[in-house]
Image (cartoon, rainbow, N blue to C red):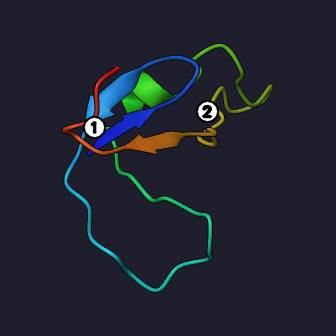
C-alpha cells in the first residue's frame, strides 16, 4: 500500500484494526514524510502529527 499526503509518500503494510472509521494510524519515524514539519506547537515545538492521506494500492499506476 502507498500512503500519500500533501508533503510526501511512503510504502506501508496494512493491518485492519478497530479504530475510528476513516482514520489511519502510523508510527514514528516511518510516517515522517507524511507530516508537515512547518506547523508546530508554539510552546513545545512538537509538529502537528495530523495529516490527510490517500491510500493507494501498491499495484496501482500513478
Task: Give the farthest residue toward the right.
Answer: 42
Q: What residue is at 58 percent from the left and 20 percent from the top?
A: 6
Distance in Å between CA atoms under marks 2 and 1: 17 Å
* Side (left or right) of 59 relative to 35: left
Q: Where is mark 2, residue-wise?
A: 46
Density class for disc 1 (Cα within 10 Å; few <14, some 14-19, many ≥20) is few
Q: Position of residue 4 (x, y in %)?
A: 45, 31
**In the rendered image, which quarter is residue 3 located in?**
top left
Compared to residue 47, the image places residue 51 above or below, namely below
What label does residue 30 carry, if any? 1
- Element carrying mark 1: loop
Q: Position of residue 57 (x, y in %)?
A: 29, 45
Q: Position of residue 10 (x, y in %)?
A: 30, 30
Density class for disc 2 (Cα within 10 Å; few <14, some 14-19, many ≥20) is few
Quadrant in the picture for the C terminus: top left
Q: What residue is at 37 percent from the left and 25 percent from the top?
A: 9
Amino acid at each position: 500500500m502507498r500512503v500519500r499526503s500533501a508533503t510526501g509518500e511512503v510504502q506501508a503494510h496494512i493491518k485492519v484494526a478497530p479504530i475510528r472509521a476513516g482514520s489511519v494510524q502510523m508510527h514514528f519515524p516511518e510516517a515522517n514524510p507524511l507530516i508537515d514539519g512547518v506547523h508546530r506547537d508554539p510552546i513545545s515545538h512538537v509538529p502537528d502529527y495530523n495529516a490527510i492521506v490517500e491510500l493507494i494500492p501498491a499495484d496501482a499506476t500513478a
